[in-house]
Image (cartoon, rainbow, N blue to C red):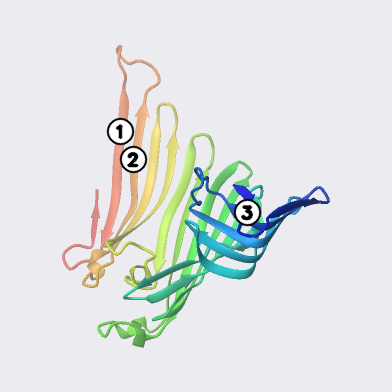
Amino acid sequence: RTFEAGGQNVARASRKDANVTEFEQGRFTPCRTDGGSPPLWCISAAKIVHDQQSGTVNYQDAQFELFGVPVLYTPYFSHADPSVKRRSGFLMPEYGHSTSLGFQVETPYYFALAPNYDFTFNPMYTSQHGMLWQGEWRHKVNWEGIRGTYNVKLAGIDQSLSTLPATAEASLDGWRGSIQTKGLFSLSTWWRFGWDVTIESDDSFRRTYKLDSVLQTDRINTAYLQGISERNYFAATLYHFGGLLIEDTPDAASRVMPVIDYNYVVNQPVLGGELSFSMNALSLTRTSAVAADMNR
């Protein structure tokens, strides 16, 4: 990451109070350049002030450049310098366009709340559907020997049925949304548990707003407990399966509560060899006209 002083006008750099450096007709880029070729992207400005004590870079009359070509102008801009790992502030905006959503712009704001947790608020405006509210909470925990991380992603929109295709169901009018959460925790040297769960108001919400791949046809939610030692293994996993296609009926949903796998290896030789035991069991529930429960 470098600062450079240069341009068509006379460039100058000065040092103040041992911590503040001012550049005139300067630019900042995190990209390396070869010879006289321009960087992939950079921020150039009439004046750049780098305060090392606060870890802040301020720009006056700034413009963003791609391959040396100006693409966006702003009278004022600031960001943390490369020495700062986490700081609250706006992240790089994202733009896009699609036939189903129209023009899209997303301007995330990052909240560095504490060393072990943070939150990103990233609403997305779409010209055809209005504002999609989004946010993600991330937390790293260490509670009396229980260590791990988890995150929660929220998304929601007050949907107007008039913005959806004519074939859309009337039930989609109003609030639609989803909650997605993942976690993994270490309970001890041998034991851990985790989950990967998505709860949504309807099957098409996440595909409509491109939160999932348009090719995804099924939803699989899991929660598990695992124990692994030098010779033994135990796992209990809960599953929920659901179809995401329009023609899917409630029959497409099923629950496995739980799948249990256990493997035990005797720690002493038996008749000159190794003796082990393995066990597997599951309980599957599915609502259908043919069968309601199957256990094995």
The residue nearer to you, when weighing 4 against 202, is: 4
The residue nearer to you, when weighing 137 against 232, is: 137
Q: Residues within 10 Å of mark 1 (few under 14, many from 20)?
A: few
Amino acid, disc 3: Gly
Amino acid, disc 2: Asp
Q: Residues within 10 Å of mark 3 (few under 14, many from 20)?
A: some
Between disc 1 and disc 3, the foreground one is: 3
Q: Which residue is mark 3?
A: 6
Determine whether, in the image, residue 266 is placed left or right of residue 93: left
The span from disc 3 to disc 2 (Cα, nearest Å) is 66 Å
* Marks 3 and 2 in Cβ contact (< 8 Å): no
* Marks 2 and 1 in Cβ contact (< 8 Å): yes
Amino acid, disc 1: Ser
The residue nearer to you, when weighing 139 against 288, is: 139
The residue nearer to you, when weighing 139 against 113, is: 113
Q: Which residue is mark 2?
A: 261
